[in-house]
Amino acid sequence: GFGSAQVARAFAAALESPDHGEGSDGISGENELSKTAKEVLAGSHPDVHTLATKGVTLSIDDVREAIGISEQMPSTAPWRIIIIEDVDRMLERSTNVLLKEIEEPSEHTIWLLCASSVMDVLPTIRSRTQLVQLATPNEQSIAEYLTKKTDADNKLANRAARLSQGNIATAFIYASDERALSRRDELIAGLLRMHDAADAIT
């Protein structure tokens, strides 16, 4: 939501591109994307694997699958890259399975771990990674982005940006689907009408 997964994919695209994204065959411009970079950003490159949350938490089976993939040699690119979204949703037992791999990864493997807040990541994971903090975009920059990427007018874009609290994915939903805003308004109105626990049931 805050863009960490997108940044991770962009970084992976640069790492896998022939010139690491610094020239006409890299990712320096929209019209200069290499075939490799396009595949990475589209999620179709065979050497870049993304582990995303399917439910509330990341399952231990999914983590084990990612570890198995990480131990394979890359097929077409220099690196085997594993991106884990929402690593802060990983349970301790899943973390224990992952620890050894990120502490002593294969020479050809790079792990990119994403989280909304580093404080929600278990200390055992934090201590074994290189931290890169991303700035949360302000309302104005989000609103400007929405007017370029959606059909939202300035009023809707500004409201979506304000309500998103810096979460670009949420802002995009609000700006693209006014029904989502309506459902939000209805939900809040319903909550405000509640006076006691019985109201939540009826």
Image (cartoon, grey):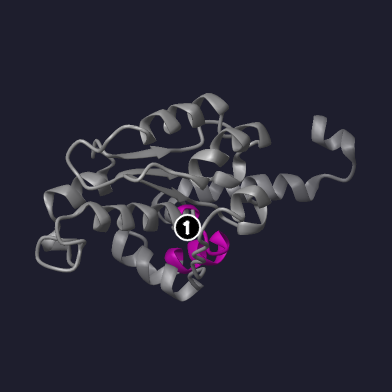
Give percent across and percent down for residue 65.
Answer: 44, 27
Residue 159 colored magenta?
A: yes
Tag 1: residue type? Ala
Q: Is residue 138 above or below residue 166?
A: below
Give percent across and percent down for residue 194.
Answer: 82, 44
- Nearer to the camera, 140 or 136: 136
Residue 174 colored magenta?
A: no
* Quadrant location, the C terminus: top right
Left or right: 15 as drawn, with respect to 192: left
Left or right: 8 as drawn, with respect to 53: left
- Name the magenta segment's main secondary structure: helix
Give percent across and percent down for residue 27.
Answer: 20, 61
Is residue 27 visible to the viewer in this orientation of the structure? yes
Quarter holding residue 145: bottom left
User: Circle 1 sits on which residue?
Assistant: 171
Disc 1 secondary structure class: helix
- Nearer to the camera, 156 or 119: 119
Residue at horizontal 90 percent and vertical 42 percent from the top: 196
Which stretch appears magenta?
Answer: 156-170
- Nearer to the camera, 11 or 179: 11
Give percent across and percent down for residue 93.
Answer: 65, 31
Q: Is residue 180 above or below residue 62?
A: below
Left or right: 87 as drawn, with respect to 33: right
Residue at horizontal 65 percent and vertical 48 percent from the top: 124
Residue at horizontal 42 percent and vertical 69 percent from the top: 143
Quarter holding residue 154: bottom left
10 Å crowding of disc 1: few (<14), some (14-19), many (20+): many
Q: Residue furthest top?
A: 61
